[in-house]
Amino acid sequence: MSLRINVEKKPGDVYTFTISGSIDSDTYKSLEDKISPVLNSSTKVIIFDMDGVEYISSMGLNTIFRTQRGIEKLGGTFVMTNIQPQVRKVLEIVKALPSVKIFETMEEADEYLFKIQRDEIEKRNKPN
């Protein structure tokens, strides 16, 4: 099965990857090629919208984990949304869920990100 990836840059250096198809040994490289240019110190958040992902292999999992580690190493946040039950099951089996921020919808992810930004602004504006 093929892999379709749409990358959208949002305000605040947030990138959403809308992914459809299978992330496997035949397709993971195309996802990595899309991630590579945005995985830098100016990127604050990478969101994987997994609504259309029907299958994920170990190579797909490795891509997700490398992306998560890469953005967190740069001080950013990695988020996944809209995970299909069969993909969620794989993430549960490899015990990835506790380390990945997962939201049911993009709206939930946006609320979470808004809260992070609001808290950061409040911290900066607090008198010492």
Image: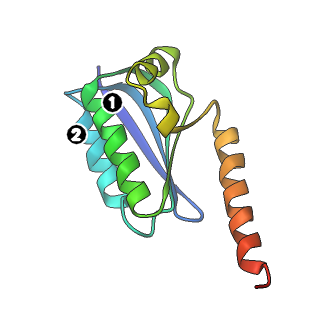
Which quadrant of the rendered structure holds the C terminus?
bottom right
Residue 3 — which label? 1
Q: Residue at x 29, y 25 (%)?
A: 2
Q: Residue at x 43, y 34 (%)?
A: 19
Foreground disc of the pair 2, 1: 2
Quarter that holds the N terminus: top left
> Which x, y percent locates residue 46?
48, 51
Left/right of residue 44 with respect to residue 124 in the rendered view = left
Name the amino acid, label 2.
Lys
| Label 1: how many Cα within 10 Å (few below 14, some 14–19, many 20+) | some
Q: Looking at this view, is 78 or 99 the one in front?
A: 99
Dot 2 falls on a residue whose secondary structure is helix
Where residue 12 sits, quadrant-wise, is bottom right
In the rendered image, the residue lying farthest to the bottom is 128
User: Looking at the image, which residue sits at the far left?
Assistant: 26
For numbered disc 1, what is the local secondary structure?
strand
Q: Is 6 positioned to the left or the right of 115 in the image? A: left
Residue at 51% across / 20% down in the picture?
A: 84
Q: How many marks?
A: 2
Marks 2,1: beta carbons within 8 A? no
Outermost residue toward the right?
A: 127
Residue 29 disc label: 2
Tell me the amino acid under the disc marked 1: Leu
User: Is 69 positioned to the left or the right of 102 in the image?
Assistant: left
Residue 112, horizontal then vertical, whole percent: 68, 48
Q: Do we see residue 49 in this rendering?
A: no
Give the mark nearer the N terminus: 2 vs 1: 1
